[in-house]
């Protein structure tokens, strides 16, 4: 494989991520060493490597050198840190997404080389609180992210040089009139800012990212017809460093000799 995603750990979170990526046509390889889970992977015809993700040879067998990204969902934060250290050393360009069980460990994982750290427990707790505090907002978000019968999606579209939208203002582009989409925000190519609810005079330029809301048919039409983006989903998936996007710099921990746990 080339340009695939490696998933370390096939528990509840890893299993769900694997399903979503596979359903989207993204190639994945799972690293797992529990017999019952390996049998499940075999039955589901899911590519896997039988081994410990904390071992360099296991990551190499999973193709870490040519992979586009790695998702680390092991149950212990210290294990996730160790895997991140090794994976970053083996592939400096790798996009590494890591789960953490404790928010206080986020900085440590980032310093180890992670591109982005997510705390599922905090996200879940925040959403549960919003059910009480903002029930209608939560209803709206739930219907969007779960792809329900409303068939409306949040998506991101990159503006390519020479496309119909390149150099035009929101008003001149006529996105609402021509594509019947709502622009939620613009992520300018040359800054770390996000322009929420852009006005009609805001100008679009090559490299800008549009955050839009609408049905998938219209989103794809704007992507190809308006923004000149001919890339497949696999070519568009995240490979950038989130820290740089928000203007933070982190020096990754480097090690030149094998380390023990």
Image (tube, helix red, strand yellow):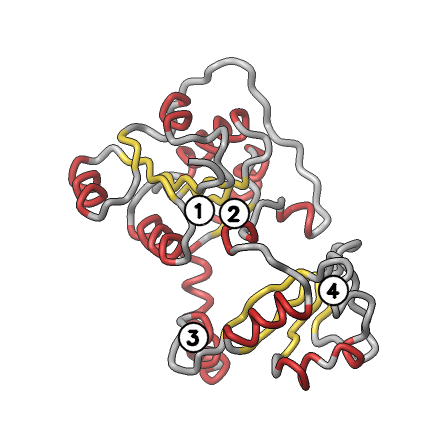
Q: CA distance from mark 1 to mark 3?
A: 22 Å
Q: Give the SS element for disc 2.
A: strand
The disc, 3 or 4, on the residue closer to the chain's N-terminal end is 3
Please tell me which residue is depicted at 79% across the width and 81% down the height of the picture: 171
Q: CA distance from mark 2 to mark 3?
A: 22 Å
> Is there a contact, CB below 8 Å, between mark 2 and mark 1?
yes
Q: Which mark is residue 99?
A: 1
Q: Which mark is residue 163?
A: 4
Residue 206, x across and y down, in percent: 77, 59
Please tell me which residue is depicted at 62% across the width and 48% down the height of the picture: 242
Q: Which mark is residue 207?
A: none
Camera-side residue of 140 and 78: 140
Quadrant where the image shows the C terminus: top left
> Is there a contact, CB below 8 Å, between mark 4 and mark 2?
no
Camera-side residue of 109 and 38: 38
In the image, is 142 to the left or to the right of 229? left
Quadrant where the image shows the N terminus: top left
> Is there a contact, CB below 8 Å, between mark 2 and mark 3?
no
Camera-side residue of 244 and 219: 219
Mark 4 surroundings: few (<14), some (14-19) or many (≥20) residues within 10 A? some
Residue 19, x across and y down, in percent: 33, 55
């Amino acid at each position: 494989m080339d340009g695939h995603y490696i998933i370390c750990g096939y528990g509840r979170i890893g299993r769900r991520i694997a399903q979503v990526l596979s359903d989207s046509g993204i190639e994945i390889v799972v690293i797992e060493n529990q017999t019952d889970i390996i049998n499940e992977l075999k039955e589901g015809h899911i590519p896997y490597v039988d081994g410990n993700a904390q071992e360099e040879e296991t990551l190499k067998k999973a193709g870490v050198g040519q992979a586009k990204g790695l998702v680390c969902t092991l149950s212990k934060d210290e294990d996730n840190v160790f895997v991140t250290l090794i994976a970053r050393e083996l592939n400096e360009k790798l996009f590494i997404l890591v789960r953490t069980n404790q928010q206080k460990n986020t900085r440590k994982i980032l310093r180890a080389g992670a591109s982005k750290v997510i705390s599922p427990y905090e996200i879940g707790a925040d959403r549960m609180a919003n059910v009480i505090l903002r029930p209608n907002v939560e209803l709206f978000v739930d219907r969007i992210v779960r792809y329900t019968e409303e068939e409306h999606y949040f998506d991101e579209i990159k503006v390519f040089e020479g496309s119909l939208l390149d150099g035009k203002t929101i008003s001149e582009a006529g996105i609402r009139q021509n594509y019947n989409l709502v622009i939620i925000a613009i992520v300018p190519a040359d800054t770390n800012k996000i322009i929420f609810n852009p006005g009609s005079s805001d100008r679009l330029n090559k490299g800008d990212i549009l955050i839009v809301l609408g049905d998938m048919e219209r989103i794809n039409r704007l992507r190809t017809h308006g923004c000149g983006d001919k890339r497949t989903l696999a070519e568009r998936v995240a490979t950038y460093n989130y820290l740089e996007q928000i203007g933070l710099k982190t020096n990754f921990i480097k090690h030149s000799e094998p380390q023990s746990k």
